[in-house]
Each structure stands twice: as C-alpha cells, then as structure tokens.
Image (cartoon, helix red, strand yellow):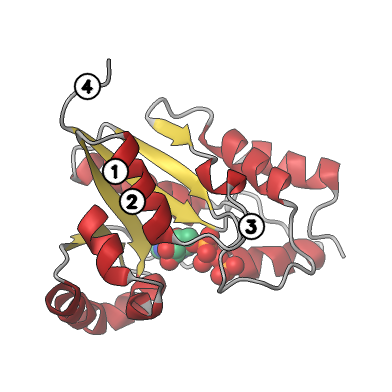
Amino acid sequence: MEKKNRKIGIMGGTFDPIHIGHLILGEAAYEQFGLDEVWFLPAGNPPHKRNRAGRAKDAQRVEMVRRAIASNPHFVLCTKEMKDEGYTYSYRTLEAMRKEHPCTEFYFIIGADSLFYFDEWKNPERICAAAKILVATRDRAKEKELLACMERNAKKLHGTFLKLDTPNLDVSSHELREWIREGKSVKYYLPDSVISYIQEQKIYQD
Ligand code: ATP
C-alpha cells in the first residue's frame, strides 16, 4: 500500500547528459521541502528540443540517469515519458501521475531558464493545477527577475511557485556535450559512472 500524503518531487529534463546541476537540484528539493522521493523523468520527445543530431539515444539518456542516481536511495528513475508516442507534454505526464497516485502531492522542479518561458509551455495552468512548482536560480545575477517572474506566473496561472535555495551551478548539458566533443575533461561535472558510459558508448564524440 502506498503511503498517504506522500510528497514527490519530479525532476524532469532532457538529461542529455544528466549533470551535477540536475542532481543538486533534486537533492536540494528533497531536503528543503521534506520530500519522500524525487523522481527523475527523462523527457520523451519534447516539442522544444527536436534537433537530435549529436545527441544521445533515448535508451542512452535513460541509462545515464539510472547510473547517476544509483547511489541515492530517495532518487527514483521514472521512464513514463519514454513509453509515450508522439510529443510529450509535462501537463499530460503530471495529470496522469495525479490520476495514478491520488494521495500524492507533486512538486515539479525546474531551473530558472525554464521558468522564464514557462507560460509558453503547453497548458501551463494545468501543470500548476497538478503540482507545486519549485524553481532554482540558474544565474544569481537574474535573481530579481526570477522572483518577479515567479510572482507574475503565480497570479496568471493560479499556481504555487516556491524558490529552491541552490548555489549558482554554472553547468549545462549543452556546454558539456561541446567539451566532450572537443576532448576536454568533464570530470566532477558528471558522475564517474556516467563518464565511463559516455566513453564506452562513444556518445557526443562527433
Ligand atoms: P541544455 O544545455 O541541453 O539545454 P540543460 O543543462 O538545461 O540542457 P535539461 O535537461 O534541459 O538540462 O534541464 C532540466 C531541468 O534542469 C530544467 O528545468 C533546467 O532549467 C534545470 N537545470 C539544468 N541545469 C541547471 C543548473 N545548472 N542550475 C539550475 N537548473 C538547471
């Protein structure tokens, strides 16, 4: 039987590849909001990231996430979106989760860059109806802008936007893919188990 009133964080992302920024966000949410678990949800086929050239295959993104979270007992891999046909939308995934787990409270974890275009996502008000939104700074210089944007969205979308307290984590998958292609070291930006998988599978190398 599922525990009543569980609090679950949803850490969605393309994870191409998963990096310390994502992992620290998940852990900060777990700790600061007293979550029971954080589910890492690799995006299936998000409409805003369609260019697949030089990218990992879906199965490889999933395997990188599996390896990256393996040592953390409250992190869980959720492959729900990998099974969907066509484009995947967060509102649909979250609504399906609510249906499957009616006694669970969901917290959708995003970085500031995602918040800045949140109202352009498909049905953002339905995302807000299904989950509270936890937002992490991605660039401290934009902190004021971020707080204003959270307030605007809360009003407009009738949602709950809460600030996650995280250090400035100046790392992105985009930059890491470039470094790997250029043969630069990515040690400590990714778990060793993910780096060795990227090398074995020759991902991002051309
Ligand atoms: P890319 O560089 O390919 O756009 P990314 O590094 O932003 O990728 P995603 O998988 O798209 O990674 O990110 C998933 C979520 O994690 C998004 O909400 C994003 O804002 C957030 N995120 C990613 N990196 C960081 C970071 N360094 N600090 C805070 N949030 C982050």
Give the residue displayed 31% in from the left and 63% down from the top. Answer: 136
Whether label 2 touches label 1, CB < 8 Å: yes
User: The disc labelled 3 sits on which kind of residue?
Assistant: Asp
Residue marked by disc 1: 98
The CA distance from mark 2 to mark 1 is 5 Å
Taking 189 as reference, is 102 left or right? left
Q: Residues within 10 Å of mark 2 (few under 14, many from 20)?
A: some
Q: Position of residue 83 (x, y in %)?
A: 60, 44
Residue marked by disc 3: 16
Task: Give me the disc on residue 152.
Answer: none
Q: Residues within 10 Å of mark 1 (few under 14, many from 20)?
A: some
The CA distance from mark 4 to mark 3 is 33 Å
The CA distance from mark 2 to mark 3 is 25 Å
User: The disc labelled 4 sits on which kind of residue?
Assistant: Lys
Give the residue displayed 45% in from the left and 33% down from the top. Answer: 76
Residue marked by disc 2: 95
Which quadrant of the view contains residue 166? bottom left
Residue toward you, 146 or 186: 146
- Disc 1 secondary structure class: helix
Q: Is residue 190 visible from the viewing direction of this image?
A: yes
Residue marked by disc 4: 3
* Mark 3: C-beta under 8 Å from nearest atom of ligand 1: yes
- Disc 3 secondary structure class: loop
Q: Position of residue 80 (x, y in %)?
A: 51, 42
The CA distance from mark 4 to mark 2 is 19 Å
